[in-house]
Amino acid sequence: MPSPLAQYALERNFPSPLIFTPEKAGEDVFLSDLRALQPELCITAAYGNILPSKFLNIPPLGTVNIHPSLLPLYRGAAPVQRALQDGVKETGVSLAFTVRALDAGPVIACERLEVDDQIKAPDLLALLFSEGAKLLIRELPSILDGSAKEKAWPQDDSKVTLAPKIAPEESGLSFDQEAIVLHNKVRAFAGWPGTRAKIAVVDKGDGQCKVLELKIITTRVCSHRNIERDEADDVTFVKGALIFPCGGCTALEVLEVQLPGKKVVNASAFWNGLRGQKLKIL
């Protein structure tokens, strides 16, 4: 089955012999096919590995990467997710020449973007790559005539931050953290791997308890003061949101959730489905 990118190209009648899907960029067959095309320039985007010299030596004008951060910030495989996790108010996209080090090449141009406090990683990633494509088209003449190499500036290694690949085991939410930390994590991990929370469902009649694992889809930081609850670990429901008590006397509003194997539902539908049972954080 073709990759999403290959499928996109095929749907637009791109010649199938020119669509390469190697496991690694250093494969001999792939490099031989690439050399046969005699490309003057290569463009990369969302490629999370270091390209080998055998690849970089092929195009005489070099390889240019569209990287969704303001380099040297957030070098690595997950720049958008890690930026959202950090709660940044501004990010951007950079065009940089590729070298034999992780996202460390000279920067040709960059575009800054304010970050909405509700935007999720998939939407921000799409927006940044859209801006990156426009930036590439704008800068392409200087790349092709060679002047981009003269104007490109070296990155300041003293300001480097890293954006390591996200691991599935990072998806858990711990409610002893402040609400803003959890909200940012939900936005950052949206799509994959998502964020999950274990909660207790307590029957008010016999007190029996069962544990549920909820996928937390959409949140916001609670602005309500003095939320009434019987016990400190109670999850309450206020104005269409599940209110989770968090560290630092803060609270998180959960607006959409998903049970394993079920569809995403809003907080109201989930709360109504409890039929009077209590929720507690674990």
Image (cartoon, rainbow, N blue to C red):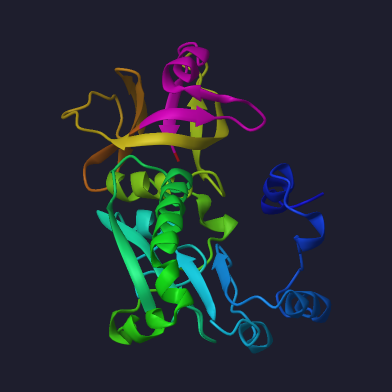
- Answer with left or right where residue 214 lies relative to residue 21: left
Q: Nearer the viewer, residue 267 or 74?
A: 74
Looking at the picture, how far across and down is residue 86, in whole percent? 33, 58
Is 210 or 219 nearer to us in this picture? 219
Q: Does the magenta stretch include residue 67?
A: no
Of 60 and 275, which appears nearest the observer? 60
Q: Which residue is drawn at 23% across and 41% down?
A: 250
Q: What stretch is highlighted in magenta?
A: 254-281
* Residue 151 drawn above or below residue 135: below
Left or right of residue 29, residue 164 in this image = left
Q: Residue at x 65, y 75 (%)?
A: 39
| Quadrant that contains the C terminus | top left
Percent x, y for residue 258?
A: 55, 30
Above or below 112: residue 55: below
Can residue 192 be seen by looking at this rendering?
A: yes
**Residue that protrudes farthest toward the left in the picture:** 225
255 falls in the magenta region: yes
Q: How many labels does the image show?
A: 0
State whether residue 173 appears in this view. no
In x, y percent, where is residue 212? 56, 33
Q: In this view, does 208 lie to the left or right of 150?
A: right
Task: Name the residue: 54% across, 44% down.
Answer: 191
Q: Which of 197 and 223 is in front in this view?
A: 223
Image spot of residue 27 (x, y percent): 78, 78
Q: In which quarter of the image is residue 260?
A: top right
